[in-house]
Image (cartoon, grey):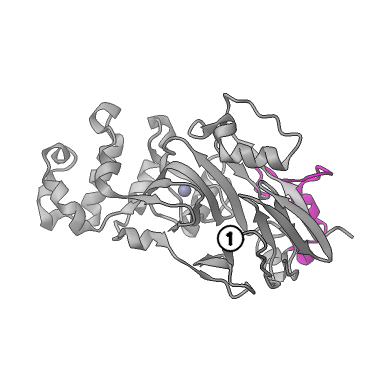
Amino acid sequence: MTERVFRFKGACNNYPWGRTGSESLASQLQRKNDRDFQLTEDAFYSELWFGDYPNFLARLLEAGELLKDVIGQNKEGMLGKTASEALDGNLPFLPKILSIAKALPLQFHPNKGLAAKLHEQDPGNFKDPNHKPEIAVALSRFEIFAGFKPLPEIEPLFRLPPLQQFGPSLADAAARSDKELREVVRSMLEADAKTIKSLITLLYTNFLILNPGEAIYMPADDIHAYLSGDIVEYMARSDNVLNLGFCTHAERYYLDVFTNALTFEAHSTNDVMLSSQKSEKSKSGRTVVFSRLFASSTLLKADLQAEESDKISASDGLGVFIITKGEGDLIADGKEFDLSKGSIFFVAQGIPVE
Ligand SMILES: [Zn+2]
């Protein structure tokens, strides 16, 4: 019988927006966790994925066996009934660490209906039929553009001469329907780099700076660009993305799909920020839960000082833990494990942890 609580390791990727070498939190955590990891100082370490999504697969720390194979041997026992049935033994979420030096592409993620359609039409670019709402918790100062500002706040900008070139209807309030606004955004996205500079994002979207421990929630269909900082990112099990800016024109595929999906739903920065509450599962109250839920899974954050502890009661689904700072012990399933920065654990359904 396979162990139901075990340590495992994720995999780093090397996108050029990532921090380099040992500056990257992703590489720091990976190096601490995995003795075999070879760090190259001039390489980019953008993300550390620690899930079972096919691009960057997690493995057991010692045996090297794939996490998905270990789960596959005992799907219901590991994941619980709901999760094992919903995605045929796959993890229902995809956890990552991001260490960002410069802007990621301005992007949005298709909702479930659109993702299913795109996956069927173009499985090369859209590898799964799932939506991808995401939560990001800052681990350092974190900068982001997120969601369109409410229309009344953008309105004065429509009168600025540099913007008039993108649509004759801008100055005419009566003509500013979603249809017209889509055309304006489309012509901006099609404009050459010289014309555009960073005009669109600077003028239209909210700019936020998060401090460590603060979080944002990005639903599917919402425009965003992460700019700099270290974060834990937690999303539905999907890798579907449409890139629109801060990238080459060649990478901006499906401009029509994007502009047609735009809703210009009003957002204030408060709509984007995600609050946390004490988790009902936490005995000491030192573990908080981020309130937005999707796919019936959730994100917990425990802050423990020296000599402090917490017990988290059993859940009917699985858990994945990552230690981002410090060291300590984990007691679960009758065993005690050493924890240090970078440690990643799988805890099967029905097991409380201390
Ligand atoms: Zn995203």
Residue flagged by tag 1: what amino acid is it?
Asp
Q: At which x and y percent is residue 339?
A: 72, 52
| 330 lies above or below 163 | below
Give the residue displayed 71% in from the left and 64% down from the top. 84
Q: At which x and y percent is residue 303?
A: 58, 60
Q: Residue furthest front?
A: 307
* Residue at the disc numbered 1: 303
Asked if the stretch drawn in magenta spans residue 63, the answer is yes
Give the residue displayed 52% in from the left and 40% down from the top. 99
Which residues are the magenta region? Answer: 52-78
- Any part of residue 14 in sight: no
Q: Residue furthest top?
A: 42
Task: Confirm or reject: label 1 Cβ below 8 Å from ligand 1.
Answer: no
Q: How many marks are shown on the rendered structure? A: 1
Q: Which quadrant would residue 266 be assigned to in this image?
A: bottom left
Q: Residue furthest right?
A: 1
